[in-house]
Amino acid sequence: MLLQADAQEPLVAEADRTGGSCAARPLRVFVHLAADKDAVAWRRAWQAGTLVGVNEETPYGYGRAERMGCTLAFARAHRENPAARFLRLGLRVLLGFDLLHALRQGRALAEAEVVWTHTESQFLAVAAVHAVRAERPKLIGQSVWLFDRWERLNPFHRMLYRRLIRHVDVLTVHSTENLAVARALFPGKRVMHVPFGIPSERVAVPVRRSGRPLRILAIGSDRHRDWACLVAALDRLPEASAVILSGTAPRRLARGRPNLRVTRARTNAELAAHLAEASVVCVPLKPNRHASGITVIQEAVLAGLPVVATAAGGLEDYFGADAVGYVPPGDPAALGAALLEVSADPEAAHARAQRAQARMIEAGIGAETYIRRHVDISREMLNR
């Protein structure tokens, strides 16, 4: 669904415009997000309870920056006829980023002091716009998937992206694995590790669950979810049942498996019901570099549930093995054993859930720290 903008609605509630932790003159920030992350439509979905997951009024919590002494403008989606939409998406496929969406931001993009982006699709597009302008705001280019697939890029895209990254002032990544790759590829570029965090103020105290019957909940639509590994593990656990909540997991996985259901949670109420029934949240992953699954892990930890996940993508930088049950990639036997352990020793699983929540608090894992890092980096770039 294309989220449409409404220019008449403010993007941040009036109550959020108070306070501030920085200099007298606010920092002008333009938050350039994907076309389907329009901030006004995001807020409407959040208010309606159809924005599934731990979210808040502004996309990814970026609105918190207003309480940190910034003024924000968000990228707006534009209404498109079929021809315009075909052209925009066609260019996105050709280039690998959404150039027309960035060009449509016009004056709001140009008037900012600094631009924040959420993935490479946005920062490459902004960099392309900046490449033809003499004066431009500073640009923080946040990457998620780019360095996972860098080796598989064709020569044209590699050359193009290298040129565009020259116009990025700071590259940021969510994992230390991506950090190492990015620094090796761009030794002259400033690259920083900025851990991703979700709103973490609301916490459900972990409750000791019996683990019998074992009810497994797996959530996510990321391209690196390893559903085949989870299904193979489930086949080893005939007494267990599993629910996969995903917009990308094939429904055929459940054929011939009465203990597996593949569906979607369309409201937060539905998600909450699934979490209330679960014994454990499982995050099966293929090898990756970008901390795939970290959002779901944080949501499960806040819900007070034990987590079993694949040790991939730098997740252990967020939560150690004492807080999350980790297994090697592509190992259904190990995954099945880790899930079975939750059933066999619910007390130990409960203790891990408690330690995971403590880790979030002690390490400051959450949206507040995530957004504040953006503010601090921006002010450092501008010597403010």
Image (cartoon, rainbow, N blue to C red):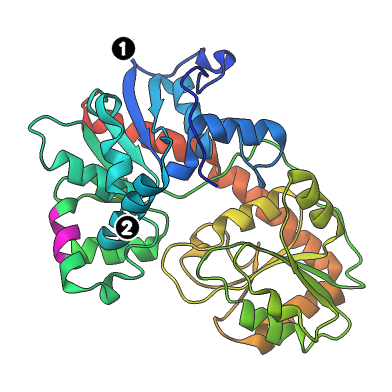
Residue 2 vs residue 255, the one in the foreground: 2
Q: Residue at x 66, y 55 (%)?
A: 356
Name the residue at the left extreme.
134
- Residue 162: quarter of image: bottom left
Q: Residue at x 35, y 54 (%)?
A: 143
Q: Is residue 278 magenta?
A: no
Q: Amino acid at mark 2?
A: Gly
Whether residue 187 is visible to the viewer of this picture, yes or no, is no
> How many numbered marks, from 0 up?
2
Residue 295 vs residue 99, the one in the foreground: 99
Q: Is residue 161 magenta?
A: yes
Q: Which mark is residue 25?
A: 1
Whether residue 261 is visible to the viewer of this picture, yes or no, is yes
With 14 as the anchor, is 49 left or right in this view? right
Label 2 packing within 10 angstroms: few (<14), some (14-19), many (20+): few
The Cα atoms of the two marked residues, 1 and 2, are separated by 41 Å
Label 1 packing within 10 angstroms: few (<14), some (14-19), many (20+): few
Q: Is residue 60 above or below residue 194?
A: above
Q: Which residues are magenta?
A: 159-163
Pointers 1 and 2 in contact (CB under 8 A)? no
Q: Amino acid at mark 1?
A: Arg
Image position, residue 123 (x, y; %):
29, 47
Q: Residue at x 62, y 52 (%)?
A: 298
Q: Main secondary structure of the magenta part?
A: helix
Image position, residue 7 (x, y; %):
46, 21
Secondary structure under tag 1 reads loop
Q: Earlier in the sequence, mark 1 or mark 2?
A: 1
Q: Is residue 335 above or below residue 33?
A: below
Q: Which mark is residue 360?
A: none
Q: Which mark is residue 90?
A: 2
Q: In which quadrant is the C terminus drawn?
A: top left
Of tags 1 and 2, which is closer to the observer? 2
